[in-house]
Amino acid sequence: MATWRLSWNFNKESYQPGDFGNLSFYLENLSDSFLFASDVGIQFDWMGDKYYHIELDKNYGNAVPPNSTRLISGIDFNIPNNVAGQSIYRVYYHLYEYDKTSDELYDLGERWSDEKYFINVFPTPLFRAFVTRSLAPEDRITGDETIRILQEWGFNTKTVEFKTKQPDHVLRNIIRHEIYNSDCLIAIATPRYIDALSGVWRTFEWLHGEIGIAIGRDFPILILMDKRVTLGGLPSTLKEYTILFDPYG
C-alpha cells in the first residue's frame, strides 16, 4: 500500500496586501513503489470555491522513487489588496502510484488537506500604537480582540502593565515615555463603574490622563467607546475621533 507525506514551503514568512507569492510542494515517498503527483493546488479563504491549481506532466521523470523526497511543483499566487491578518488556506493534490514493470499508473485519488493552515498578511509600514485599555479580567475579551485586529492591520501595540503596584511618579514617567515613543494613541473605553451622582457608566480613570498626554503631543487619537459608557472631561469633546461599539452586538 502506498504511503506518502506532502509538505510545502512559502517563499516568505509573511506577506503584504497586494503581494505576489510562491508555494513549493514536496512529496516524500514512504512506500516501495514509485509515486507521481498529477495535480497540486492551494485555496485561500478569500477565494470562495476557486483555487490556484497546476497540472503536472505525466511522465516517468516526474515520479518520486521509493523512500525519497522531491520537489514536485511550485505555484504562484496573488494576495488581494483588501486582505490582511491571518488567512486560512488548504492544499489539494492528486496522486498516482507508478508501476515501473508494467509502465502503468494507478489512481490514488484526489485529496484536500484535512487541517486548516494560515499565512500572515501584514500591511506596511508598521505603526506603533499606544493602546490605553482596562486590564480588568472582565474587559480582557474586548481588549484582547481589539489588539488582535489592530496588529493584523499593521500596528505594533503597546500597553503599560505591571505585575506589582508602582509609585504614581513611576507610572507617570513610564506611560509618558511609551506614548511619546508611539505614532498614535488608541483608547478602548470600557465600563468601569457607575457614577453615583449621574447614574451613568464611567470608564477607567487612566484613560483621561493618557488621552491628555497624546493631545499635548498633537498625536492622532482614536477612541473606541462601549456604547454604555459616558465620557467626561477632555475625552467627551473628541466626538469626531470616537467610534461607538456594542460588545454584545
Image (tube, rainbow, N blue to C red):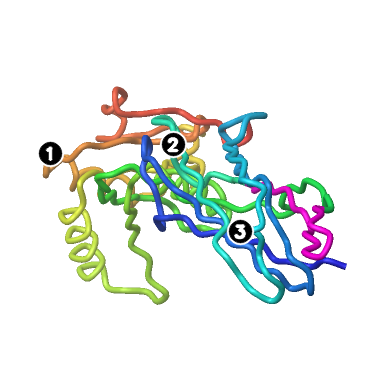
Mark 3 element type: helix
Marked residue nearer the N-terminal end (1 or 2): 2
Disc nearest the viewer among 1 and 2: 2
Image quadrant occupied by the C terminus: top right
Q: Crowdedness of circle 3 by 10 Å Cα count: few (<14), some, many (20+)?
A: few
The image shows residue 155 at horizontal and vertical percentages of 33, 48
> What element does badge 1 sit on?
loop
Quadrant of the drawing holding the N terminus? bottom right
Magenta region includes residue 34: no
Q: Is residue 94 left or right of residue 20?
A: right
The answer for how far apart the CA atoms under marks 3 and 2 are is 30 Å
Asked if the residue under mark 2 is in contact with the one under mark 3, i.e. CB atoms within 8 Å, the reply is no
Q: Tell me the distance, in whole angstroms, between the alpha carbons under discs 1 and 3.
A: 66 Å
Identify the element where label 2 is drawn: strand
Indicate the amino acid at tag 2.
Asn
Q: Which residue is mark 1?
A: 218
Residue at point 56% right, 33% down? 46
Earlier along the polypeptide chain: callout 3 or callout 2?
3
The three-letter code of the residue at mark 1 reads Asp
Q: Which residue is mark 2?
A: 78
- State whether residue 222 is above or below residue 7: above
Instruction: Give the foreground label among 3 and 2.
Output: 3
| Horizontal and vertical percent position of residue 247 | 58, 37
Residue, disc 3: 61
Which is more foreground, mark 1 or mark 3?
3
Instruction: Give the amino acid at mark 3.
Output: Gly
**Other residues around mark 1 within 10 Å, as few (<14) / some (14–19) / many (≥20):** few
Place of residue 86 in the rendered image (x, y in percent of width and height, measured from the top left): 51, 47
Do callouts 1 and 2 mark residues in contact (Cβ within 8 Å)?
no
Residue pictured at 79% horizontal, 74% vertical: 32
The range drawn in magenta is 90-105
